[in-house]
Image: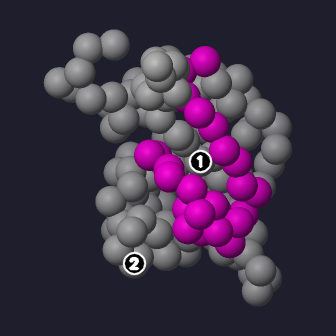
Amino acid sequence: MNSTSEIEKKRILIVDDESDITDYIEEILRDKYDLLRAENGIKALSILKNETIHLVLMDIAMPGDKLERLSGLDALKAIRSKEDTAEIPVIMVTALSSREHKLAAKQAGANDYLEKPFKNDILLKKVSSLLDDPQGDS
């Protein structure tokens, strides 16, 4: 009747202005999750408005100085401000590792924070901990 892969695969939105980073994350996650990508915050918000997304992986340091773009933190604040997206888990993935950046991400509503460069298994564990149903058996 229904394919189990269609039923079980959760959808992740990867938001990063550097396509090589997005490609790398896709390589790690593509076997287990359905993936979409956006290169800036505005495109991410558009996708979130039109698609069912179960988790967002978002870079903090995306250009936010132009009208058509949003920084990762501004996009996160916009996600948290809308009723239909407020509960979507968001992991900030960034090379910015200072305490101030971690605090800003947490205050903006990030569920977790992953520093670049990261190990594949750490990314998988963080994603899995936010997405996998602890009551379900895979």
Numbered range of the magenta stretch: 31-55
Which of the labelled discs sits on residue 13, or is there none? 1
Depth check: 51 or 21 in front? 51
Q: Is residue 60 visible?
A: no
Q: Amino acid at mark 2?
A: Ser
Colour pattern of the rendering: one colour
Depth check: 18 or 39 in front? 39
Q: Which quarter of the image is occupied by the C terminus?
A: top left
Q: Is residue 52 magenta?
A: yes
> Distance from label 1 to label 2 (Cα)?
18 Å
Depth check: 87 or 116 in front? 87
Q: Residue at x 82, y 44 (%)?
A: 19
- Which x, y percent locates residue 38? 72, 55
Residue that extends furthest to the left in the rendered view of this protein: 135
Q: Is residue 32 magenta?
A: yes
Task: Count neighbours of disc 2 (C-alpha within 10 A) and say few if under 14, some if 14 to 19, many if 20 or more.
Answer: some
Instruction: From the image, tell me which residue sits under label 2.
Output: 81
Which of the labelled discs sits on residue 109, or is there none? none
- Which x, y percent locates residue 77? 46, 74
Q: Residue at x 70, y 66 (%)?
A: 43
Q: Is residue 69 left or right of residue 45?
A: right
- Local SS, label 2: helix
Against 128, residue 58 (above or below) is below
